[in-house]
Image (cartoon, grey):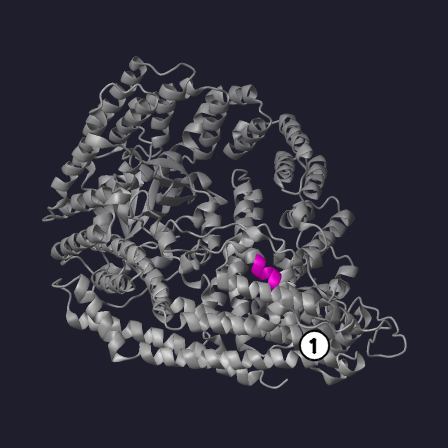
Amino acid sequence: MSQALERQIKPIYDSLDTGSNKSAIVACNKLLKKYPKNELIKSLKALALVRSQKVEEALVLCDELLQAKPTDDPVLTALMHCLRGLGRHKDMVTMFEDAYKQQPANEELGIQTFFANVRAANWKSAQLIATKMHKQFQEDRYIFWNAISAVLQARDPATPPGMQTILFKLAHRLLESCTSPTYLIADRFYLHLFVLRELQLYDDAHKLLDSEIGTVICNTNLSCNEIRRDIWKRRGMVAEEGARGERRIIEQKDRNWLEFLAVLDATFEGPEKPTAESIEHAVHLFTSVAEIDGTKDRTGLLALLEVEKRARQSNLSTDPGRLPSLLRDYFGRIGGKACCFEDLKPYLAFEGNEKSEWASFLQGVATTADTISNLQRSINAHKILRFMLDPSQVTVESESTLLSTYVDLYLSALPLGADLPSTELQPADDFALLAGNTLVSLWKLTSDAKHLQNAAILLEFALGKSKHSFQSRLLLIRVYRLLGAPSLAVDYYRGLQVKQVQHDTLSHFLLSRASNFSLAASGDLTFSSECLESSQIYLSNTQETGDFIVRAFTSEKYSQIPEFIEFEDRLENSLQRDLVKIEHLRMRTTHEVITSDLIDMELIELKFIFDRTHHDNRDFDILANYQPHFSKSLNEQTLLFNLPAEGHGWLHVFMQVYIRALQQGSDLDDTVEEKLLIGDRPKQSPDPEKRGPLKERLKQVKEECLTELTPDEVLLVTYAKALADWLEPYHDHVRPPPAVVLAEAAKQTELKTGFALRGIEIPPLNGNGNGKKDEEAPAIADPPQEVVEFFAKIKARFEVVVDQPSLNDILQVATLAQEAFMLFVIETLRFKSPSVVKIHKLGALTNSFKPIRATALEVLKFISAGLTTRSEKEGSTEVRTAFIDGFSESLSNKDIDQEFVQGIAKKTTESRKKVLEGVGKGLLRVCSNYSTN
Amino acid sequence: MSVLRPFKAADMFKFNNVNLDIWTETYGIGFYLSYLARWPDLCCVQEAPSGRMMGYVLGKAEGTSHEWHGHVTALTVAPEYRRLGLARKMMNLLEMVSDESYKGFFVDLYVRCTNSLAISMYESFGYSVYRRVREYYGSLGIGKGGRDEEDAFDMRKPLSRDPNRRSVRLNGREMIVSAHDVP
């Protein structure tokens, strides 16, 4: 390239870097006039086009460039970014492979080709390239690239089990062939051990580990040490591992719990049965550790508890008083630290006298909270006492007493933290959380929402005192959802400042069954936009994680590569991702006009995700659980509708409902889709259940999946299935043949972009252009009962729930009725066109829609009116007074300001009023949007 | 009592109890992956036996010739596990690896000049102020905390490769440099 040209191209790069794609395109066009054949300018233009969403134009340029099989590095790089933007990883592989074939001596091209395959997870091809590269360039690292590719192929779920061993053997052979020993680099050593472990060549692995250098690596590299531990264990070296742990504990003062576990395992699970002596030996070791460490480190003390626990399990405990005395000792030393309760949880399963003595010990500590350390002790004592309660001890009365105790202690301890800066957590917070747990338990015992309201008041109070207590926030979100005050749940969720990957693990707090609360139909897109925001992270994953996988290859961090791939997969195929997708779709249909474009787009997206193997990354453990050991956890207790969180079954059923409805409403059949879609298709799942024709699999609603649904949701699903079964033959009959659809698509594209649709040849149409099929229309069947009766049934349900205290049932019935109607709109859209009906002689069918639609509209209006009445009631002074009275009844003479209570009552009832009103309005809007046939 | 183990990419799914605390920032996934892709041995997690995460440290190795050193980028412990000596254990590991695997001359870290609690903690670990970096945390103007709020102390601790303690000095607090002059 001439220097002059180089100077002219630089601004284009600058524009691309700063995101000014428009000026990049202008600059390219200008230069192309002078250099019409320059590949680099063209490829940069293509990139700018991709980035400004001008896909069609970009495709034309890309294809032209690819055909010329470029080898120039800057051109390849620009095209690589283009193809990634278009999701065409396979084409990227081909591009680099073609270039590398032309210049087999170009190492950089070889590397790029290898990486292109890595990004596309083509492990087999990656291996072949690495082999070739090692032959050509004689660099050791290509052997390792080759070996890890074999390992990754073996781990790929699509690889048949028989192949796995062969691949690991291949990797083994490669590593053994390497001229330099693997221990020169810790991560090479790791890979070597990894392969040996997979092949169960434990002796070989041991030989490597036993060397001086092997020992050094394991001492300074936690990953290698982790795999060493595992290999020793598999090799039956429990006793050696114990001895090693003991040495490290004594000589290096290592306090890693894993070393203590090693000693414990050697004592109790070693080749020799545990004896009084061996146990005594361990006790002696841990006692001396505990003495040396004092209160500085709790490991020795906890190891003593673990010894006693295991001794009891093996009937080797000699002193029945030992466990209680160890517990008391532990509490005495560590009780002033927040972790004490969690530490002791595994050791609290005992009965009888021991239990009552321990309980009275704790009760002795529990009442004093005059200093921060005593407060922490009191909190720990109360948490343990509550955890150890038996079912007979949990009654409305006892819980009310406990509640009063917790609240009193909370309020009396607050002054201890009064001087802390507002950024610090208050030391008394956990009493407020204990009270919150107890109020939820009281609500479960009595079904009286008063307790939830009181929880809201108390937690709001606590959050006012401790502004950054995320535990109070999380519980408040749950409580407000249960109370049917979604706008407050949104406020508190936003206050958590959930970022990045946390969206995947935490958005369920807000978005689980969020369409229940969505006011999208009336134009309020709060929940819709939360859905979109929480989904950004999946885009980042697609765009970024691949780069880091490649980077881990470059830096030869073999321990990380499988971890990164697993991470990428868990995020890409996250259950929460697609639950949010479905919730968003449920909201979107009520807000936007249903058109064939919307139907097609959503259909393609859902079809892509239907066969995913989902991973559940949701964090449910984050919610601090202080319920008794036998009870359901706070998380389970505070989910909506008293059901477990929506899981794989729920998602599967709702995807079936929507894919079926959208597929019927769409003209895109598989052949059309194949032609029109750009980018890679999802890999086929190895799961045999996910093979078979999609159309059939959509119809099979599995019983076990339905158990994850509420009865009202089941009603909707039954209705949707009946509706789809009924209309399927007519859709299939009327849907224009692929050629017609493609011709229309080509026409539209050309109109829109000025470019012909690529790669599509439209066969001449035979005779009539309207796609009328020769065969007769299927006989018109009467609508099935499930469809005809649905709206009457849901109306009856609404009449039952409308006066019940829980808003969630009311909102659910209302939004499901609306959803049923929207599905009806999607399913009947095709038959709205009079010419279609006339040509196909479907007048009788459309006539049978009319009464269904009329009933549906009538029911929706009825529900809307009911919601309005109920919302007025929620806004009344009586309800607000009752809210306030509910607090003074249970928590009278507690030092919480009346005005504060009034404030919470006001905002909660207002939020409830707003959601009822909003859903009601939305229903009316849907009715008016679709009132005419 | 805690398990010391490597930080893994999938730990991003379970660090909420650490990261929801306001003092801990949650970065984009690329931030964590960039550390793991280069210095996985300088990134570790402390975990309770229940599997709950207690805290983690992310570090790197950087610098040239006599400035070659280990750097602590993020060190954090969940609120309920503070005052248990976890920070010291994680720092010990990072120092040991910086010393033995990377053969660095020292380990360093940045801390807000106002954070006296952290400064005295690091001092008790053997760190001392090497220099004060002006406006390291961005220019905030003279607010409540004054310059101390926006400036950072660069604190260092020499490793075995620096027996003569050339990487530290006594009057570090008076040595003021601009944020542009540090990596």
Q: Is residue A495 magenta?
A: no
Residue A196: quarter of image: top right
Q: Nearer the viewer, residue A20 or B45?
A: B45
**Mark 1 highlights which residue?**
A830
Which part of the image, by quadrant, shows the C terminus of chain A?
Answer: bottom right
Q: Is residue B179 left or right of residue A678?
A: left
Q: Is residue A866 above or below residue A418?
A: below
Which part of the image, by quadrant, shows the N terminus of chain A?
Answer: bottom right
Kindly tell me whether residue A432 is visible in this rendering: yes
The three-letter amino acid code for the residue at tag 1 is Arg
Q: Nearer the viewer, residue A609 or A750?
A: A609
Where is residue A236 shown, x and y percent of the image? 48, 19
Kindly tell me whether residue B82 is visible in this rendering: no
What residue is drawn where x is 75% and y is 60%?
A66
Q: Nearer the viewer, residue A99 or A254?
A: A254
Residue B1: quarter of image: top left
What residue is drawn where x is 29% and y is 14%?
A276
- What crowding class fits label 1: few (fewer than 14 Cα within 10 Å), some (14-19), or many (20 or more)? many
Where is residue A337 shown, x and y percent of the image? 21, 42
Which residues lie in the magenta part? A653-657
Residue, far right: A767
Q: Nearer the viewer, residue A287 or A481?
A: A481
